[in-house]
Amino acid sequence: MSNIKLSNCVGRIKESPTLAITAKAAKLKSEGKDIIGLAAGEPDFDTPDFIKKAAIDAINNGLTKYTPVPGLTSLRKAVIEKFNRDNNLIYKINEVLVGVGGKQCIFNLFLALLNTGDEVIIPTPYWVSYTDIVALTGASPILVRCGIDQSFKISPQQLDKSISKKTKIVVLNSPSNPTGSVYSKRELQELSKILLKYPDIHILTDDIYEHIRLDNEPFNNIIMVEPKLKERCIIVNGVSKAYSMTGWRIGFAAGPEKIISAMSNLQSQSTSNPTSISQAAAEAALLGDQSCIKPMLNAFRERHAFVVNAFNDIKGLKCIDAKGAFYSFPFAKIAIDTLYKNGKIKKNDDITFSEYLLDSKGVAVVPGSAFGAENYFRISFATSIDNLKEALSRIKEAIED
Protein backbone atom coordinates (compact mmCIF):
# COMPACT_ATOMS: atom_id res chain seq x y z
CA MET A 1 0.00 0.00 0.00
CA SER A 2 2.86 2.39 0.76
CA ASN A 3 3.93 2.25 -2.90
CA ILE A 4 0.69 3.74 -4.20
CA LYS A 5 1.35 7.11 -5.79
CA LEU A 6 -1.60 9.33 -6.64
CA SER A 7 -1.57 11.80 -9.48
CA ASN A 8 -0.42 15.40 -9.24
CA CYS A 9 -3.90 16.31 -10.46
CA VAL A 10 -5.76 14.83 -7.49
CA GLY A 11 -3.20 16.39 -5.17
CA ARG A 12 -4.34 19.85 -6.23
CA ILE A 13 -7.80 19.47 -4.73
CA LYS A 14 -9.35 18.81 -1.33
CA GLU A 15 -12.63 17.38 -0.16
CA SER A 16 -15.55 19.80 -0.26
CA PRO A 17 -15.57 21.41 3.22
CA THR A 18 -19.35 21.72 3.29
CA LEU A 19 -19.83 18.04 2.48
CA ALA A 20 -17.14 17.05 4.98
CA ILE A 21 -18.77 19.00 7.81
CA THR A 22 -22.20 17.67 6.88
CA ALA A 23 -20.81 14.13 6.97
CA LYS A 24 -19.19 14.70 10.37
CA ALA A 25 -22.42 16.13 11.77
CA ALA A 26 -24.38 13.16 10.40
CA LYS A 27 -21.90 10.74 12.00
CA LEU A 28 -22.23 12.44 15.38
CA LYS A 29 -26.00 12.40 15.05
CA SER A 30 -25.96 8.67 14.22
CA GLU A 31 -24.01 8.13 17.43
CA GLY A 32 -26.91 9.62 19.37
CA LYS A 33 -25.58 13.15 19.86
CA ASP A 34 -27.93 16.12 19.62
CA ILE A 35 -26.71 17.84 16.45
CA ILE A 36 -28.28 20.67 14.46
CA GLY A 37 -26.77 20.78 10.98
CA LEU A 38 -26.58 24.20 9.35
CA ALA A 39 -23.90 23.31 6.82
CA ALA A 40 -25.68 21.72 3.88
CA GLY A 41 -26.78 23.99 1.05
CA GLU A 42 -30.06 22.36 0.15
CA PRO A 43 -33.70 23.24 0.78
CA ASP A 44 -35.44 21.24 3.48
CA PHE A 45 -38.64 20.99 1.42
CA ASP A 46 -39.68 17.97 -0.60
CA THR A 47 -39.62 18.06 -4.38
CA PRO A 48 -43.09 19.20 -5.59
CA ASP A 49 -45.48 16.33 -6.35
CA PHE A 50 -46.01 17.15 -10.02
CA ILE A 51 -42.26 16.88 -10.59
CA LYS A 52 -42.05 13.53 -8.82
CA LYS A 53 -45.02 12.31 -10.86
CA ALA A 54 -43.20 13.20 -14.08
CA ALA A 55 -40.30 11.00 -12.97
CA ILE A 56 -42.62 8.10 -12.10
CA ASP A 57 -44.34 8.44 -15.46
CA ALA A 58 -40.94 8.43 -17.18
CA ILE A 59 -40.08 5.13 -15.50
CA ASN A 60 -43.44 3.60 -16.36
CA ASN A 61 -43.13 4.78 -19.96
CA GLY A 62 -39.69 3.23 -20.39
CA LEU A 63 -37.55 6.39 -20.40
CA THR A 64 -34.71 4.36 -18.92
CA LYS A 65 -32.17 4.29 -21.76
CA TYR A 66 -29.30 6.48 -22.85
CA THR A 67 -30.20 9.97 -24.03
CA PRO A 68 -28.13 12.34 -26.15
CA VAL A 69 -25.03 13.40 -24.23
CA PRO A 70 -26.07 17.08 -23.93
CA GLY A 71 -29.52 16.08 -22.71
CA LEU A 72 -32.94 15.24 -24.10
CA THR A 73 -33.95 17.55 -26.92
CA SER A 74 -37.24 18.22 -25.16
CA LEU A 75 -35.41 19.23 -21.95
CA ARG A 76 -33.01 21.49 -23.80
CA LYS A 77 -36.01 23.13 -25.45
CA ALA A 78 -37.51 23.61 -21.98
CA VAL A 79 -34.26 25.27 -20.89
CA ILE A 80 -34.45 27.54 -23.93
CA GLU A 81 -38.02 28.42 -23.01
CA LYS A 82 -36.93 29.14 -19.43
CA PHE A 83 -34.26 31.58 -20.59
CA ASN A 84 -36.74 33.30 -22.90
CA ARG A 85 -39.48 33.46 -20.25
CA ASP A 86 -37.41 34.43 -17.22
CA ASN A 87 -34.47 36.30 -18.69
CA ASN A 88 -35.55 37.52 -22.13
CA LEU A 89 -32.56 35.68 -23.62
CA ILE A 90 -32.66 33.66 -26.84
CA TYR A 91 -30.58 30.50 -27.28
CA LYS A 92 -30.47 27.79 -29.93
CA ILE A 93 -30.52 24.09 -29.17
CA ASN A 94 -26.79 23.69 -29.82
CA GLU A 95 -26.07 26.45 -27.32
CA VAL A 96 -27.52 24.49 -24.39
CA LEU A 97 -26.05 21.59 -22.41
CA VAL A 98 -27.61 19.62 -19.56
CA GLY A 99 -25.19 18.20 -17.00
CA VAL A 100 -25.16 16.17 -13.81
CA GLY A 101 -25.75 19.22 -11.64
CA GLY A 102 -24.46 22.75 -12.06
CA LYS A 103 -21.11 21.64 -10.64
CA GLN A 104 -20.44 19.36 -13.60
CA CYS A 105 -21.33 22.16 -16.00
CA ILE A 106 -18.75 24.39 -14.33
CA PHE A 107 -16.24 21.53 -14.32
CA ASN A 108 -16.79 21.02 -18.07
CA LEU A 109 -16.53 24.74 -18.76
CA PHE A 110 -13.23 25.20 -16.95
CA LEU A 111 -11.72 22.12 -18.59
CA ALA A 112 -12.91 23.35 -21.98
CA LEU A 113 -11.39 26.84 -21.67
CA LEU A 114 -8.44 26.78 -19.29
CA ASN A 115 -4.80 25.88 -19.80
CA THR A 116 -1.81 25.92 -17.46
CA GLY A 117 -0.86 29.54 -16.82
CA ASP A 118 -4.32 30.98 -17.38
CA GLU A 119 -5.99 33.00 -14.63
CA VAL A 120 -9.55 33.04 -13.34
CA ILE A 121 -10.78 36.03 -11.34
CA ILE A 122 -12.95 34.92 -8.42
CA PRO A 123 -14.52 37.44 -6.04
CA THR A 124 -14.03 36.26 -2.47
CA PRO A 125 -15.91 34.86 -0.50
CA TYR A 126 -16.56 32.24 -3.17
CA TRP A 127 -18.37 28.93 -3.58
CA VAL A 128 -15.93 26.26 -2.38
CA SER A 129 -15.53 24.34 -5.65
CA TYR A 130 -14.50 27.18 -7.96
CA THR A 131 -10.87 27.26 -6.87
CA ASP A 132 -10.38 23.51 -6.79
CA ILE A 133 -11.79 23.00 -10.27
CA VAL A 134 -9.57 25.80 -11.59
CA ALA A 135 -6.57 24.15 -9.93
CA LEU A 136 -7.35 20.84 -11.65
CA THR A 137 -6.82 22.50 -15.02
CA GLY A 138 -3.42 23.92 -14.07
CA ALA A 139 -4.76 27.47 -14.19
CA SER A 140 -4.58 29.86 -11.23
CA PRO A 141 -7.48 31.37 -9.28
CA ILE A 142 -7.04 35.09 -8.67
CA LEU A 143 -8.92 35.82 -5.46
CA VAL A 144 -10.26 39.33 -5.01
CA ARG A 145 -11.24 40.01 -1.41
CA CYS A 146 -14.67 41.58 -1.05
CA GLY A 147 -15.48 42.02 2.62
CA ILE A 148 -18.61 42.76 4.56
CA ASP A 149 -17.96 46.51 4.22
CA GLN A 150 -18.68 46.22 0.47
CA SER A 151 -21.48 43.70 0.85
CA PHE A 152 -19.18 40.94 -0.43
CA LYS A 153 -19.28 42.26 -4.03
CA ILE A 154 -16.39 43.05 -6.34
CA SER A 155 -16.11 46.69 -7.41
CA PRO A 156 -15.34 47.81 -10.98
CA GLN A 157 -12.02 49.18 -9.75
CA GLN A 158 -11.07 45.87 -8.15
CA LEU A 159 -12.06 43.97 -11.28
CA ASP A 160 -10.06 46.23 -13.58
CA LYS A 161 -7.00 46.06 -11.35
CA SER A 162 -7.14 42.25 -11.21
CA ILE A 163 -7.22 41.69 -14.96
CA SER A 164 -3.95 40.69 -16.62
CA LYS A 165 -2.85 39.29 -19.96
CA LYS A 166 -3.38 35.83 -18.45
CA THR A 167 -7.00 36.40 -17.45
CA LYS A 168 -9.27 33.90 -19.20
CA ILE A 169 -12.47 33.87 -17.11
CA VAL A 170 -14.23 36.14 -14.63
CA VAL A 171 -16.67 34.41 -12.26
CA LEU A 172 -19.85 36.12 -11.09
CA ASN A 173 -22.20 34.35 -8.68
CA SER A 174 -25.38 36.28 -7.88
CA PRO A 175 -27.25 35.52 -5.64
CA SER A 176 -24.12 34.32 -3.93
CA ASN A 177 -23.14 31.23 -2.05
CA PRO A 178 -21.95 31.76 0.72
CA THR A 179 -22.99 35.36 1.39
CA GLY A 180 -26.42 35.82 -0.20
CA SER A 181 -25.20 39.03 -1.84
CA VAL A 182 -26.81 40.13 -5.10
CA TYR A 183 -25.44 42.49 -7.73
CA SER A 184 -27.90 45.22 -8.61
CA LYS A 185 -28.62 46.14 -12.21
CA ARG A 186 -26.52 49.27 -11.84
CA GLU A 187 -23.61 47.36 -10.32
CA LEU A 188 -23.69 44.89 -13.21
CA GLN A 189 -23.73 47.78 -15.67
CA GLU A 190 -20.58 49.18 -14.09
CA LEU A 191 -18.84 45.80 -14.18
CA SER A 192 -19.86 45.31 -17.80
CA LYS A 193 -18.14 48.57 -18.74
CA ILE A 194 -14.87 47.08 -17.52
CA LEU A 195 -15.42 43.73 -19.23
CA LEU A 196 -16.24 45.35 -22.57
CA LYS A 197 -12.67 46.69 -22.61
CA TYR A 198 -11.28 43.13 -22.62
CA PRO A 199 -12.82 41.19 -25.52
CA ASP A 200 -10.82 38.00 -24.94
CA ILE A 201 -12.15 37.39 -21.41
CA HIS A 202 -15.03 34.99 -20.85
CA ILE A 203 -17.58 35.42 -18.08
CA LEU A 204 -19.16 32.64 -16.04
CA THR A 205 -22.43 33.82 -14.55
CA ASP A 206 -23.49 31.27 -11.96
CA ASP A 207 -27.24 31.82 -11.56
CA ILE A 208 -28.16 28.71 -9.57
CA TYR A 209 -29.95 30.81 -6.91
CA GLU A 210 -31.79 32.96 -9.45
CA HIS A 211 -35.25 32.30 -8.02
CA ILE A 212 -34.24 32.54 -4.35
CA ARG A 213 -34.59 36.31 -3.99
CA LEU A 214 -35.22 37.58 -0.47
CA ASP A 215 -36.10 41.10 -1.56
CA ASN A 216 -38.65 42.20 -4.13
CA GLU A 217 -36.15 43.19 -6.80
CA PRO A 218 -36.20 41.44 -10.20
CA PHE A 219 -33.33 39.12 -11.06
CA ASN A 220 -30.59 40.33 -13.42
CA ASN A 221 -27.43 38.76 -14.71
CA ILE A 222 -24.73 40.54 -16.64
CA ILE A 223 -25.97 39.42 -20.08
CA MET A 224 -29.44 40.75 -19.38
CA VAL A 225 -27.86 44.08 -18.46
CA GLU A 226 -25.31 44.17 -21.31
CA PRO A 227 -26.30 42.00 -24.31
CA LYS A 228 -22.98 42.75 -26.04
CA LEU A 229 -21.33 40.32 -23.60
CA LYS A 230 -23.56 37.40 -24.59
CA GLU A 231 -21.12 36.00 -27.16
CA ARG A 232 -18.52 35.34 -24.44
CA CYS A 233 -20.73 34.60 -21.44
CA ILE A 234 -21.71 31.18 -20.16
CA ILE A 235 -24.70 30.89 -17.85
CA VAL A 236 -24.83 27.98 -15.43
CA ASN A 237 -28.11 27.25 -13.68
CA GLY A 238 -30.17 24.24 -12.65
CA VAL A 239 -33.20 22.88 -10.85
CA SER A 240 -31.56 21.98 -7.53
CA LYS A 241 -32.30 25.05 -5.45
CA ALA A 242 -35.52 26.57 -6.82
CA TYR A 243 -37.41 23.27 -7.02
CA SER A 244 -35.73 21.49 -4.09
CA MET A 245 -34.18 18.88 -6.40
CA THR A 246 -30.60 18.69 -5.12
CA GLY A 247 -30.47 14.88 -5.26
CA TRP A 248 -31.83 14.71 -8.80
CA ARG A 249 -28.53 16.20 -10.08
CA ILE A 250 -29.60 18.28 -13.06
CA GLY A 251 -27.88 21.50 -14.04
CA PHE A 252 -27.63 23.25 -17.36
CA ALA A 253 -25.43 25.70 -19.20
CA ALA A 254 -26.01 28.08 -22.08
CA GLY A 255 -23.40 29.90 -24.12
CA PRO A 256 -21.56 30.11 -27.42
CA GLU A 257 -21.98 26.96 -29.52
CA LYS A 258 -18.24 26.30 -29.78
CA ILE A 259 -17.84 26.27 -26.00
CA ILE A 260 -21.00 24.23 -25.38
CA SER A 261 -19.85 21.68 -27.98
CA ALA A 262 -16.49 21.34 -26.24
CA MET A 263 -18.22 20.91 -22.88
CA SER A 264 -20.44 18.22 -24.41
CA ASN A 265 -17.39 16.36 -25.76
CA LEU A 266 -15.86 16.36 -22.29
CA GLN A 267 -19.10 15.12 -20.81
CA SER A 268 -19.26 12.30 -23.34
CA GLN A 269 -16.04 10.92 -21.84
CA SER A 270 -17.09 11.30 -18.21
CA THR A 271 -20.75 10.78 -17.28
CA SER A 272 -22.21 10.59 -20.79
CA ASN A 273 -25.81 11.80 -20.46
CA PRO A 274 -27.42 12.89 -17.20
CA THR A 275 -29.92 10.41 -15.72
CA SER A 276 -32.85 10.07 -18.10
CA ILE A 277 -35.47 9.99 -15.34
CA SER A 278 -34.07 13.10 -13.66
CA GLN A 279 -34.17 14.85 -17.03
CA ALA A 280 -37.90 14.14 -17.31
CA ALA A 281 -38.42 15.57 -13.82
CA ALA A 282 -36.38 18.68 -14.66
CA GLU A 283 -38.42 19.25 -17.81
CA ALA A 284 -41.61 19.14 -15.75
CA ALA A 285 -40.11 21.59 -13.25
CA LEU A 286 -39.14 24.12 -15.91
CA LEU A 287 -42.41 23.91 -17.84
CA GLY A 288 -44.81 23.39 -14.92
CA ASP A 289 -46.57 25.71 -12.51
CA GLN A 290 -43.86 28.03 -11.19
CA SER A 291 -45.97 28.96 -8.16
CA CYS A 292 -44.46 25.90 -6.44
CA ILE A 293 -41.44 28.11 -5.65
CA LYS A 294 -43.44 30.66 -3.66
CA PRO A 295 -44.07 28.71 -0.41
CA MET A 296 -40.36 27.89 -0.13
CA LEU A 297 -39.44 31.50 -0.83
CA ASN A 298 -41.83 32.81 1.81
CA ALA A 299 -40.30 30.45 4.37
CA PHE A 300 -36.75 31.50 3.44
CA ARG A 301 -37.70 35.16 3.89
CA GLU A 302 -39.12 34.53 7.34
CA ARG A 303 -36.08 32.52 8.40
CA HIS A 304 -33.68 35.09 6.97
CA ALA A 305 -35.25 37.92 8.99
CA PHE A 306 -35.04 35.87 12.18
CA VAL A 307 -31.44 34.75 11.62
CA VAL A 308 -30.02 38.19 10.82
CA ASN A 309 -31.67 39.76 13.87
CA ALA A 310 -30.57 36.91 16.12
CA PHE A 311 -26.94 37.04 14.96
CA ASN A 312 -26.75 40.79 15.46
CA ASP A 313 -28.03 40.27 19.01
CA ILE A 314 -24.98 38.12 19.83
CA LYS A 315 -21.92 39.94 21.17
CA GLY A 316 -19.00 39.85 18.78
CA LEU A 317 -20.97 38.99 15.63
CA LYS A 318 -21.98 41.20 12.73
CA CYS A 319 -24.39 40.01 10.05
CA ILE A 320 -25.82 41.95 7.12
CA ASP A 321 -29.00 41.22 5.21
CA ALA A 322 -28.75 38.74 2.38
CA LYS A 323 -30.60 39.62 -0.81
CA GLY A 324 -30.84 36.08 -2.13
CA ALA A 325 -30.04 32.38 -1.60
CA PHE A 326 -30.52 30.85 1.86
CA TYR A 327 -27.29 31.63 3.68
CA SER A 328 -26.07 34.03 6.32
CA PHE A 329 -22.38 34.87 6.59
CA PRO A 330 -21.62 36.57 9.92
CA PHE A 331 -18.34 38.31 10.66
CA ALA A 332 -17.07 36.74 13.87
CA LYS A 333 -13.58 38.12 14.52
CA ILE A 334 -14.47 39.86 17.78
CA ALA A 335 -16.22 36.76 19.10
CA ILE A 336 -13.33 34.51 18.02
CA ASP A 337 -10.72 36.76 19.66
CA THR A 338 -12.75 36.94 22.87
CA LEU A 339 -13.17 33.16 23.07
CA TYR A 340 -9.45 32.73 22.49
CA LYS A 341 -8.57 35.33 25.13
CA ASN A 342 -10.85 33.59 27.62
CA GLY A 343 -9.26 30.21 26.92
CA LYS A 344 -12.34 28.59 25.40
CA ILE A 345 -10.63 27.90 22.06
CA LYS A 346 -6.95 27.09 21.51
CA LYS A 347 -6.53 29.04 18.26
CA ASN A 348 -8.13 32.33 17.29
CA ASP A 349 -9.33 31.28 13.86
CA ASP A 350 -12.68 30.46 12.28
CA ILE A 351 -11.89 26.77 11.83
CA THR A 352 -11.27 26.28 15.56
CA PHE A 353 -14.34 28.42 16.29
CA SER A 354 -16.54 26.23 14.07
CA GLU A 355 -15.19 23.07 15.71
CA TYR A 356 -15.96 24.62 19.09
CA LEU A 357 -19.59 25.24 18.10
CA LEU A 358 -19.97 21.64 16.93
CA ASP A 359 -18.18 20.01 19.86
CA SER A 360 -19.58 22.16 22.67
CA LYS A 361 -23.09 22.95 21.43
CA GLY A 362 -23.79 20.49 18.64
CA VAL A 363 -24.23 23.12 15.94
CA ALA A 364 -22.59 22.44 12.58
CA VAL A 365 -21.55 25.53 10.60
CA VAL A 366 -18.96 26.03 7.87
CA PRO A 367 -15.89 28.16 8.65
CA GLY A 368 -15.36 31.16 6.40
CA SER A 369 -11.89 29.93 5.45
CA ALA A 370 -13.59 27.26 3.32
CA PHE A 371 -14.86 30.13 1.17
CA GLY A 372 -11.61 32.09 1.23
CA ALA A 373 -12.76 34.47 3.98
CA GLU A 374 -11.17 34.13 7.41
CA ASN A 375 -13.04 35.15 10.56
CA TYR A 376 -16.47 34.46 9.08
CA PHE A 377 -18.74 31.44 9.16
CA ARG A 378 -21.67 30.32 7.03
CA ILE A 379 -24.98 28.90 8.07
CA SER A 380 -27.75 27.66 5.82
CA PHE A 381 -31.23 28.67 6.94
CA ALA A 382 -32.75 26.01 4.69
CA THR A 383 -34.05 24.26 7.78
CA SER A 384 -37.04 24.75 10.05
CA ILE A 385 -37.54 27.91 12.07
CA ASP A 386 -37.58 25.77 15.22
CA ASN A 387 -34.16 24.33 14.36
CA LEU A 388 -32.86 27.82 13.69
CA LYS A 389 -34.17 29.19 17.00
CA GLU A 390 -32.52 26.36 18.92
CA ALA A 391 -29.26 26.62 16.94
CA LEU A 392 -28.96 30.39 17.36
CA SER A 393 -29.71 30.06 21.07
CA ARG A 394 -26.87 27.54 21.36
CA ILE A 395 -24.48 29.75 19.39
CA LYS A 396 -25.32 32.67 21.68
CA GLU A 397 -24.60 30.53 24.75
CA ALA A 398 -21.32 29.29 23.24
CA ILE A 399 -20.10 32.84 22.65
CA GLU A 400 -21.52 34.79 25.58
CA ASP A 401 -21.49 32.37 28.55
Image (cartoon, rainbow, N blue to C red):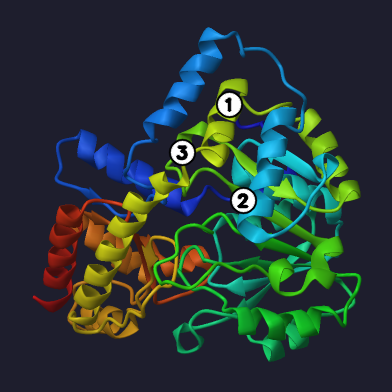
Q: Secondary structure at mark 3?
A: loop
Image vertical order of residue 175 relative to residue 296, above or below:
below
Q: Quadrant of the N terminus?
A: top right
Total numbered labels placed on residues in the image: 3
Q: Is residue 313 left or right of residue 81?
A: left
What is the three-letter code of the residue carrying label 1?
Answer: Ala
The image position of residue 332, as x and y in percent, is 32, 79
Q: Give the mark, 1 or 2, whose residue is nearer the N terminus.
A: 2
**Mark 3 vs 1, N-terminal side:** 3
Discs 1/2, front: 1
Q: Residue furthest left?
A: 401
Location of mark 3 (residue): 245
| Residue 5 visible in image | no
Q: Residue at x 80, y 29 (%)?
A: 268
Q: Is residue 137 left or right of residue 74?
A: right
What residue sits right under mark 1 in the picture?
A: 280
At which x and y percent is residue 276? Answer: 62, 22
Q: Nearer the viewer, residue 188 or 383?
A: 188
Who's the residue at 34% across and 36% down the image?
46
Q: Amino acid at mark 3?
A: Met
The span from disc 3 to disc 2 (Cα, nearest Å) is: 13 Å
Mark 3 surroundings: few (<14), some (14-19) or many (≥20) residues within 10 A:
many
The local crowd at label 2, few if under 14, some if 14 to 19, many if 20 or more residues have their Cα within 10 Å, is: many
Residue 188: x %, y % from top left: 66, 79
The residue that mark 2 highlights is 237
